[in-house]
Amino acid sequence: MLKNFIPPDLFPAMPEIFLVLMACVILLVDAFLGRTQRWIVAALTIVSLIGCALITYQTMDGQVVLTFSNMFVDDLLADFLKLMLYLAVIVVVIYSRDYLVARQLDKGEYYVLVLFATVGMMVMISAAHFLTIYLGLELLSLSLYALVAIDRDSPKATEAAMKYFVLGALASGLLLYGMSMVYGATGTLEIGGVAQALHLGVANKTVLVFGLVFIVSGVAFKLGAVPFHMWVPDVYQGAPTPITLLIASAPKLAAYAIAMRMLVYGLFELAEHWQSMLMILAVLSIALGNLAAIAQTNIKRMLAYSTISHMGFMLLALMSGVVGPDKHFALNAYSSAMYYAVAYVIMSLGAFGMILLLSRAGYEAEHLDDLKGLNQRSPWFAAVMLAIMFSMAGVPFFVGFFAKFSVLLAAVDAGHIAVAVFAVMFSLIGAFYYLRVVKLMYFDAPVDNAPIQASLDMRFLLSLNGAAVALFGIFPDTLISLCTYALMRSL
Amino acid sequence: MSSLLSLAIWIPIFGALVVFAAGNDKKLARWAALAVAIVGFLVTLPLYFNFDVTQAGMQFVEQRPWIPRFNIEYLLGVDGISMLFILLNSFITIIVIIAGWEVIEDKVAQYMGAFLIMSGLMNGIFSSLDAVLFYVFFEASLIPMYIIIGIWGGPNRVYAAFKFFLYTLLGSLLMLIALIWLFLQSGGSFNLLEWHQLRIDMAPQILLFLAFLVAFAVKVPMWPVHTWLPDAHVEAPTGGSVVLAAIMLKLGAYGFLRFSLPIAPDASQYLAPLMITLSLIAVIYIGFVALVQADMKKLIAYSSISHMGFVTLGFFIFNQLGVEGALVQMISHGFISAAMFLCVGVMYDRMHSRQIADYGGVVNTMPKFAGFMVLFAMANSGLPATSGFVGEFMVILGAVKYNFWIGFLAATTLILGAAYTLWMVKRVIFGAVANSHVAELSDINSREFLFLALLALCVLAMGLYPYPFTDVMHASVDNLLKHVAVSKL
């Protein structure tokens, strides 16, 4: 038996292996450190992620390489998304540090769980098999459930974790059930194999479409698209802000990746079916997200609803692929979805980073009123937040405008003019609550005149974040072209 | 390749960053802003003096790839239609900076910087020949205006700022879809000049025209989507009102000439009766509305809407006199409305009231000011020898040529305009001193004299000798009209 065993090519999975090892090392190192030396763990975490980035960058060759018996794929799409992912997680760790230290939450577990969540996302991004997707997703979700509850004494956080866990488990169940249908119809769970079985027409379409419904529901849950969005506002609000920052940023990249892997790579032949499902999700998300956000007084909850509408926009791009004999015809749509996801991550990091900046020891800047008069307290950070808010509203010259623009372009190209008009009308409604944030910062007098306390690295990074929102808006081509190129080489 | 247009756009914007850096140093911020504004104006002068009046096409063209992925270019250029607005805008920016000199004491650097950024963005709008570039400037210019109304505005400023932003955004979002549709239809180009040659069927032309109409009608503003303007004007600080009336309102009208007419000529002809009707409603009905206003700023705001009705009327009668008259009217209205708002600002700074009823007999305490105010009021009601007359007269002539009764109805503006403006002047300036506050008024200082005199000079020069203004637009307007006359079906 062992004679036939061919060891898998570990090379494409180097970053994942490295990060798992580092997570274990950090877990050990942490056991020997006291409270005051905890910064070493944070530094190690960042160093590991940078190391990962280097490995990914070094091994990036534009080839599509499958390994672990076709369960794991390393292509340019994966490499690009992973690089963005590391960057996002590094930013998350730096933004979160002050907040966690002030609340004595900077335990070693935090860093280890963040790293395991990252590994989970990396596995999702590189999945070439339905089960790999499931594995990655569970690794991510379980780490996140624990992270949401990391502040054990907070009843709100515990409630949020419970809600997230129960609903998340249900969604995983749905996804798994859908996968089993796919297996039943095609006899394989390899994404390439499923695509081939569909292409040859040997699979039972009825069973597949039945399974597809469950798969789309599972993905929609992870993205937080309506009507699977119930957990989003509660978890965003209940979780400690650094955890919200994590949940709201990097996993969107992974969710985009699994949507691509399952729907486009695997079930492309069923595109007309899942496109109409995504259309319903997109339309509902854009409408409900924007409407509900208006009524919020809590920033985190408002941003949660705003996330829902942004995910609606991303789905709008995903559903706009032109169905043809070649997936490359739909390149525009999928690359604009990817660009939207990346742009959203940049904006969302900045927005939640700003909440962390305004929070101090014993004080949570959670209410919209906490932003009042920010322009008088700190004109610079008010300007950063202004850029982020206008960017989210889709006003140029900010990255969010071109993200919306490319999505609308794809949608109109696919003939969905009515949906595009619908989407822009609701983003008009959405503009209201972003404008309200600007109004609070600029037009109102501050209620709280305490100077902003934040470490230098956080100030610097947040400034950089704001600059990125503006710069990628003035020179959007680099990012758009990178997304397109990565996807073109991987389809 | 000349880079004058780029300079005209980016000098004020980067200059604004320098002004922001001045922080709490008010004096430095003011002088830096003035320096930037003057340099910004000087670089636009060669646009006029080196302009080739015989050429109808685009001049001073700059072309660079901007977003190759979607074939979006950094494509700038001006013709006889747009060139004057860049000068006007850069000139008004200087006036606005001077007008806010001592009046604004709160966050001076941000105030000055916001106006400079807006000035740069507006130059961008007037010179963009790439649709996305145009759109980007068009939308981005909402941000500084929103901030200006919201921070330095009156008591109801938040409401006005939101209404301004959301109203204008509503229009431009539909236009965005239209632009994307045209991109796909033209086989992947956002070049406006290429779009002008694009053949489009009647039904899509009408839809395109309507999408553009929503965007530009809100901006002009045309009846019945004008309601944001009185609010915005009343609440905005004086400088904000000046820029809003003198430049921002022109963007909508300019959009008709650059987008609606040349891209959808058949739909323009087909829907011209609708446009003429809306314009006449603006001219007459809004004229009556202006008559009953108790607030001076509101009165001038309604008067602006009425005058802009004249501009859209001039465009949609499709003859040389009408279009050129409308363009002259736009420039002239830029001077006159700026001056009128500044006059109200001068009085408001002293009395902190804009109500006509609070004034009376101002001429007794402010004779110099009264002189200016009467001159601008006359210009606003279209007195010959002032710039207000030239444009209105040309449009009325054009309208009579097109249809006598349209010309007749348009001509009522001469009566209505005189009625609401002069009646206001009568109540505010003349008569006996109304109350002790008016008795204590001090006449304008040299700074106020400076900006009023500059504007008075422009108003008179343009009224007495409009040739330098009309000369540059002949070729381009002629070309546009020829283009519109040819069906694209």
Image: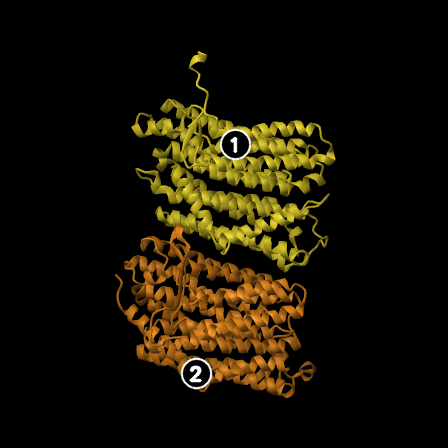
Say which element carries label 2.
helix
Residue B45, percent from left and from top: 47, 75
Name the side, left or right, on which A90 lies relative to A5.
Answer: right
Q: Which residue lies furthest to the top in this view?
A: A1
Q: Which chain corresponds to the colour orange?
A: B
Q: Position of residue A330 (x, y in %)?
A: 36, 42
Left or right of A151 on screen, residue A473: left
Q: Quadrant of the N terminus of chain B?
A: bottom left
- Residue B374 image-quadrant placement: bottom right
- Say which residue label 2 marks: B389
Element on which disc 1 rests: helix
Residue under mark 1: which chain is it in? Answer: A
Between the residue at mark 2 and the residue at mark 1, the CA separation in whole angstroms equals: 75 Å
The hue used for chain A is yellow
Residue A373 shows which numbered tag? Answer: none
Compared with residue A57, is residue B46 higher up or lower down, i.e. above or below? below
Chain under disc 2: B
In the rendered image, the quadrant that contains the C terminus of chain B is: bottom left
Residue A290 appears at what percent x and percent y?
Answer: 51, 48
Name the residue nearer the viewer: B253 or A396: A396
Q: Is residue B296 above or below residue A24?
A: below
Q: Name the residue under label 1.
A: A15
